[in-house]
Amino acid sequence: MLPSGVELLSPIEGYALDCIPEEQESQEEKGSGSLVSVCLRLRNTSAQLRTVELPAGLILISDDLSSQNGMLAQAVPLQVPAQQTLAVALHLYCINETRAPTASWDTYRLGPVTQDPGLREIINLVADKFLPVPGREEVQYAISNVTDGPGLTPQDRQALVSLPPLSAGREPGAAP
């Protein structure tokens, strides 16, 4: 997932106000979802700008079993400047309804990209939809129905299909 010259700085920590340093040019938040928010840091040791794409369905796993794991509903492209560290406030949807939302002291690690058929269907349904920060309740409800409920319902599908499309010039996973 990471190109040559780019490394993930560990651990991935729960989001805190000091996540993105003031001197960093880009202050954007990425992803969508309101219950799992982390500070992701990538270091580019190469002499060239590197692009990292976090894939839709990527799961971040909490090291604390009482905190929620998170999933990206859409791919998130990141530009990591040459010889710099990029800090990103990354927002994800919860995939463990009975666990607590992210706290700043929580730590996470990269997990797999989900292959669950219900979650993959949600990802496909929202691929061309505008999902702002802090996220869409319709998406969280659908995910919770798949991970902790009866599965994706006809009402979930209709709600996801009815979401607004991506606007011209907006990337999936970009803040409004």
Image (tube, rainbow, N blue to C red):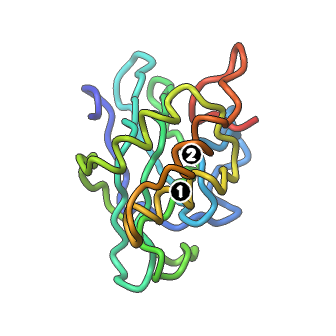
Q: Position of residue 117 (x, y in %)?
A: 27, 47
Query: Around disc 1, counting alpha carbons within 10 Å, would you say few (fewer than 14), some (14 to 19), or many (20 or more)?
Result: many
Query: Around disc 2, counting alpha carbons within 10 Å, would you say few (fewer than 14), some (14 to 19), or many (20 or more)?
Result: many
Q: In which quarter of the image is residue 171?
A: top right
- Mark pair 1, 2: CA separation: 6 Å
**Residue 17 seen:** yes
Q: Is residue 31 left or right of residue 165?
A: left
Q: Is mark 2 on a helix, strand or loop?
A: strand
Kindly give the residue lying farthest to the bottom in the view shown: 66
Residue found at x 45% / y 79%: 67
Residue type beneath disc 2: Val
Kindly give the residue lying farthest to the front in the view shown: 154
Label number found at residue 109? none
Viewer-closest of 19 and 100: 100
Q: Earlier in the sequence, mark 1 or mark 2?
A: 1
Q: What element carries label 1?
A: strand
Q: Are marks 1 and 2 in contact (CB under 8 Å)?
A: yes
Label number found at residue 88? 2
Q: In which quarter of the image is residue 56?
A: top left
Viewer-closest of 11 and 165: 165
Residue type beneath disc 1: Cys
Residue 24 to residue 47: above or below: below
Viewer-closest of 9 and 35: 35
Q: Where is residue 57 in the image (x, y as percent from the top left)?
A: 36, 44
**Residue 107 seen:** no
Circle 1 residue: 39
Q: Quadrant of residue 59?
A: bottom left
Q: Where is residue 20 in the image (x, y as percent from the top left)?
A: 64, 50
Q: Which quadrant holds the C terminus?
A: top right
Residue 159 to residue 33: above or below: above
Q: Which quadrant holds the N terminus?
A: top left
